[in-house]
Image (cartoon, rainbow, N blue to C red):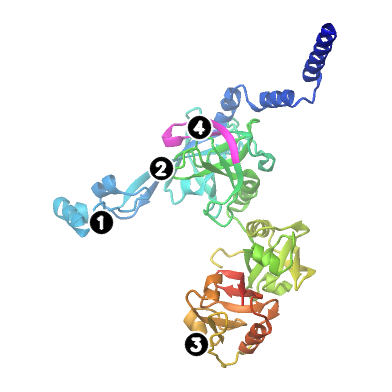
Amino acid sequence: MKNFIYQQSFISILFILFFICGCGDSPIVQARSYDMQMVPANFSKLAKIARQGVVNIRTEKTIKGGGRVFKYFFGGPQGEQKNPFGNDQFDNFFDRFFGDEGSQNKDYKQKSLGSGFIIDNEGYIVTNNHVIEDADDIKVKLSNGDEYKATVVGRDPKTDLALIKIPESKDLKPLPWGDSKKMLVGDWVVAIGSPFGLEQTVTAGIVSAKGRTIGSGPYDDFIQTDASINQGNSGGPLLNLKGEVIGINTAIIAGGQGIGFAIPTNMAKGIIDQLKNEGEVTRGWLGVGIQNITQEMADYYNLGDQKGVLVSQVYEGDPADKGGIKPQDIITGVNGKKISSTRELSRIIADTIVGKEISIDIIRDGRKKRLYVVIARRDDSQTGELSSITSQKEDKLDMNVELLNDQLASRFQINSKEEGVIVVNVKAGGKADNAGIQPGDIIVEINRESITSVDDYYKVIKSTSKGEKLKFFIKRRSGFHVINIAK
């Protein structure tokens, strides 16, 4: 009996070992195989080839004002004056001690360092706008030590990109563009640049996140990486393991070690092409104010899982106005592509060729429509009779409303042509206050019923029962909002 048990146990053990070792789909085998693929042996070959296309950029600019001694010791990073004591006595001390030299606002030269990379044998080099902005002199040093004076081809402050040029040469080693969309969070990347003036420094890390917004401009869409990036890396390439440029290193978070940001090449390439061919960037313009849809708004409009962007304003005479788009329309798609955020819509419109007709899918009053709009050129400098009947009656919601007139419009600094009733007072600690209603809010709808007069407002309030939820659709300077208040 014991022998039988031993035999059965031995067979079971052999079966388990056979299963683990022989099964190609084993999670352990898969994990080990995957780990082996994830870790590069080294970055030496990539670095040796890619460094030839990376350049060091030195600039010199004239800073207006400031004595040389004051500037040397206490000048800010951009040349601004900084009084460390925060009082006039310090300034007077310099006047007395250095005489005219201490008090005169003499010009001086500020030097800075950055990076860039060669994109073709014609001598075109990509870098950041902030690296070469307002520079009087730009010098480029190649990996072999050769130096050239560079000229500015074009700049785009909106995305912090710039294109400069040195003499063309067959000996230049351009870097190829990669596809930033194919990069996944966790993919290995390599950064090359001149941090703190240390030329041709190579660092490695991974893609930490994609689509980051850091508040640097209207077209934020950064790749976040933990590859070491510091001052002087600006304008240098972020590369995949094929040696292709998938980002332009641009920003860091002060004090945030291991956090850097790069402009994705899929956004940068079109801008660089425009700078090369036209010397400037031309962006499309729709002519609307837009905002993301909150969960409250989605519930208010019964959108369910439908994504989109709410139109908060339509500029008179601009493409959207001519195409029939109205405030409170929800834009859900452009040329058949679904839209889920203001950032996504802004990028698509900006990248659209001026004069091109596009289709705009919207939801209006619960119905889907398709409108057609001809895109105009963006100018970067841009951005019914009412009755005088008023009411000071405070309702069950602890607030006062009035019909909007010129006097109230001036008081709350809003357009007197807005339609709706305006909140003129909110009782502290009351229902409206606790829900988030503010003086100056314009009540456009309640429970999807249009509010164009004080009578409309009180009619809706009166028709609801105590404890019933009221859905307020309001407009304030920051855009539209949906606020729920229980009566």
* Res 265 quadrant in image: top right
What is the CA distance from the residue labelled 4 to the residue labelled 1? Answer: 44 Å
What is the CA distance from the residue labelled 2 to the residue labelled 1? Answer: 27 Å
- Foreground pick, 472 / 172: 472
Marks 3 and 4: CB-CB under 8 Å?
no
* Image quarter (top left, top right, bottom left or bottom right) of the N terminus: top right
What's the residue at 52%, 41% (across, down)?
Answer: 260
Mark with earlier residue (3, 4): 4
Q: Say which residue label 1 marks.
A: 86
Q: Is residue 260 above or below residue 145?
A: below
What is the number of the mark on residue 142? 4
What is the CA distance from the residue labelled 2 to the residue labelled 4? Answer: 17 Å
What is the CA distance from the residue labelled 1 to the residue labelled 3? Answer: 43 Å
- Foreground pick, 298 / 154: 298
Foreground mark, 3 or 4, reads 3
Q: Say which residue label 3 marks.
A: 407
Residues in magenta?
191-208
Give, as a three-letter code, the residue at label 3: Gln
* Image quarter (top left, top right, bottom left or bottom right) of the C terminus: bottom right
What's the residue at 64%, 79% (across, down)?
Answer: 466
* Residue 11 in the figure: left or right of residue 344: right
Among all residues in the image, which is located at the extreme front? 1
Sort mark 2 into few (<14), some (14-19) or many (20+) by Cα contacts within 10 Å.
some
Q: Say which residue label 2 marks.
A: 112
What is the CA distance from the residue labelled 3 to the residue labelled 4? Answer: 65 Å
Secondary structure found at label 3: helix
Foreground mark, 2 or 1, reads 1
Foreground mark, 4 or 1, reads 1
